[in-house]
Amino acid sequence: MLVITVEHLNKEFRIPHEKRDTLFAMLTGLMRPASYETFSALKDLSFTVEEGEMFGIIGENGSGKSTILKILARIMRPTSGTIEVKKTVTPFLELGVGFQYDFSAVENIRMYGIIMGLSQRQIESRTDEILEFAGLERFRDTKLKNFSSGMQVRLAFSTAIQTDPQILLLDEVLAVGDMEFQKKCLGVLDTFKKEGVTIIFVSHDLESVKKHCSRTLLISHGEQVMIGETAEVVDRYQRSA
Amino acid sequence: MQGNHLRELYNYRQLIWAIAWGDFKWRYKNSILGYFWSLLEPLVMLVILYIVFSNLMKVQVEHYQLFLLLGIIMWNFFVKATSYGLTAIVGKPSLVLKVYFPRDILVISGCITAMLQSLFESLIFIAFMIALWIPISVNIVYLVYILSIYFIITFGVALALAALNVYFRDIQFIWAVVLQAGFFITPILYPLSIFSPELQAILRLNPIAQIIVTARDSILYSIPPYSVSLAYAGTAAVIIFGIGYAIFLKLEPRFAEEM
């Protein structure tokens, strides 16, 4: 079954020549029409993703990879084109969204869990498991501001993976943390894959992409260069670089 | 706001509550007096204003301290809820840029945080009511309607401010001036009867004035509210809420790009 169908997706950003970010500037500028340039971040993209597939997106910096994820996550709206998503999307664009440093580990687990779509009850029953996975059992009531950045990431990741995703959007979040943590992360990815979770994986780490993704999309300056078997797409990308 | 949006909001009720309660706790987390700060603020205002207005200005109002306190608590709710509304979107960039949920949730949560604070402040008011042994009557049931209307008006204003502040960062300065002026043109310190009938008619156009007057009548003086006032405030609430939501929905699609 196709869970994601994207057809002729276009995204344009308006870049105003003169920034009118105050009411005053807008009122004084009423006489002169605002001039701006449009920047096409995505041009006529079409692709589909099968249920249970791990789908890679690669391309140089600024090619529009993250914009695709933001549109799939409904954070941004497309300028034109249609997007059909059949299941719930869980975006991992950043770990620890909504973390508050004045609150304890447990309080943050609760908040972050709810933001990621878990219910109060699910969080209660999984809190111990989350702390254990993060290796932070002793710090359950410690305020987040007293955590090292590594501990914060571990806490965020352990909470995030407790969400039961149907479609997971992954944007380089695995690039943080040490070797051991990364191994743990990839282990979790494998578990998700086995459970049949659809994963969209944006990465610069071509080795991981090759290892995990069955199909991959290569984009350059917002344009679709190639889509197909990961090995061939990665090969094409490496030759063009 | 359509039916399915209401259902969507209902599905997010745990998130709405978590954000509202989290902010409420966070506001008092690092202060020594904790939650009692929120009681101190209206109390200090009450004492100062009471001294100034009952002694120097010779305001002649029955139960003036309660008259004043109720006005302050109710006005404070509007000030807080709209101020939280201003920063509801721009103050939580990661929740807007990195995850998705209906963005009006952030504004609703802000209004609920303000409501929790006002409910807490009302404890002082209730304590005064009991201490002064002021009788209440059945007219107090109108309070449910009045406060609901008040919440809807405030929510509508907060929605508009939240959305506009993403695009125009000077809205917050303009709003500070509006609130300043609002404090004096709304009958918080004085009864409307000190003015000429013409001026009273103008001041009554402010729906919040109607709401505060009606609330005082029903709680303090056991006077049933005028149906005209109730109808006027209700109509104003529908209009303000409608405009607020329309502005929010119009500007919402590009929040993530403008931030």
Image (spheres, rainbow, N blue to C red):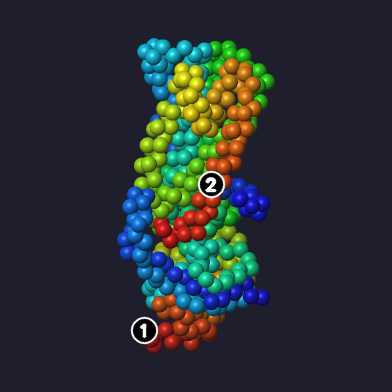
Question: Is B98 drawn above or below residue A203 in the view shown?
Answer: above
Q: Position of residue A9 (x, y in %)?
A: 52, 74
The residue that disc 2 covers is B243
Q: Which chain letter goes with mark 1? A: A
Among the 4 quarters of the image, the one containing residue A203: bottom left
Q: Residue A207: in sight, yes or no?
A: no
Of circles 1 and 2, the one toward us is 2
Density class for disc 2 (Cα within 10 Å; few <14, some 14-19, many ≥20) is: some
Separation of disc 1 and disc 2 at Cα?
A: 52 Å
**Circle 2 — which element?**
helix
Query: Outermost residue, front direction?
Result: B198
What amino acid does circle 1 point to? Ala
Q: Which chain letter goes with mark 2? A: B
Question: Is B14 drawn above or below residue B97 in the view shown?
Answer: above
Q: Is residue A196 left or right of residue A99?
A: right
Among the 4 quarters of the image, the one containing residue B241: top right
Identify the residue at image location x=54%, y=51%. Answer: B246
Identify the residue at image location x=68%, y=20%. Answer: B138
The circle drawn on residue A241 is 1
Q: Position of residue B117 (x, y in %)?
A: 50, 33
Q: Position of residue A105 (x, y in %)?
A: 48, 48
Question: Is B39 drawn above or below residue A227 in the view shown?
Answer: above
Query: Outermost residue, left direction?
Result: A18
Identify the residue at image location x=61%, y=22%. Answer: B218
Q: Position of residue B123 (x, y in %)?
A: 53, 24
Q: Is residue A38 left or right of residue A124?
A: left
The circle drawn on residue B105 is none
What amino acid does circle 2 point to? Ile
Question: Is A13 drawn above or below residue B152 in the view shown?
Answer: below
**Circle 1 — which element?**
loop
Do labels 1 and 2 touch, CB within 8 Å?
Answer: no
Near-viewer residue (B10 or B25)? B10
